[in-house]
Image (cartoon, rainbow, N blue to C red):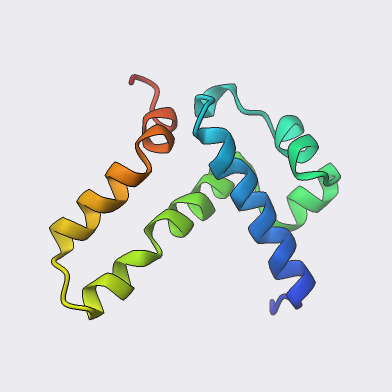
Amino acid sequence: MTLTLKQQRTKLDIIKTMNSMLKTTPFDQITINVICQKAFIHHSTFYRYFADKYDLLGGVLTLICAPIREELTKGISLMTTITHIVTSNQAQFRNMTRKK
């Protein structure tokens, strides 16, 4: 399914909302209802783009890890790139796990 620009923007807004929430809130405490409230969308809109919050988490990981390919093409090592991504997103990774 090809998304329109508006649909792509809505999907990205939902992903960014979840990413922002993960900076302060553990994943298991985040509900779809809260995601929808913070993203200013209806539940049906959420489910148009994601099966559940675990599916959305995959979108967040994709967003966070997007720089990997670009940095590798610049000749930056994989380990340096991963270290940079983990360091830059410590709160999100911490809140994605059950035990900190």
Give coordinates of residue 79: x percent, y percent.
14, 57
Q: Quadrant of residue 74?
A: bottom left
84 vs 37: above or below? below
17 vs 96: above or below? below
Identify the image quadrant of the N terminus: bottom right
Give coordinates of residue 22: x percent, y percent.
52, 34
Image side of residue 33 versus residue 63, left or right: right
Give coordinates of residue 43: x percent, y percent.
82, 43
Image side of residue 10 versus residue 43, left or right: left
Identify the image quadrant of the C terminus: top left
Q: Quadrant of residue 7?
A: bottom right
Seen from the viewer's position, the closer of residues 20 and 59 is 20
Task: Give the residue displayed 70% in from the left and 37% down from the top.
Answer: 35
13 vs 41: above or below? below
Task: Give the residue displayed 69% in from the left and 69% down from the top.
Answer: 8
Task: Give the residue displayed 44% in from the left and 51% down from the top.
Answer: 61
Give coordinates of residue 68: x percent, y percent.
30, 66
Image side of residue 36 versus residue 87, left or right: right
8 vs 51: above or below? below
Count the marks. 0
Seen from the viewer's position, the closer of residues 27 and 87 is 87
Task: Give the residue displayed 76% in from the left and 32% down from the top.
Answer: 33
Seen from the viewer's position, the closer of residues 9 and 57 is 9
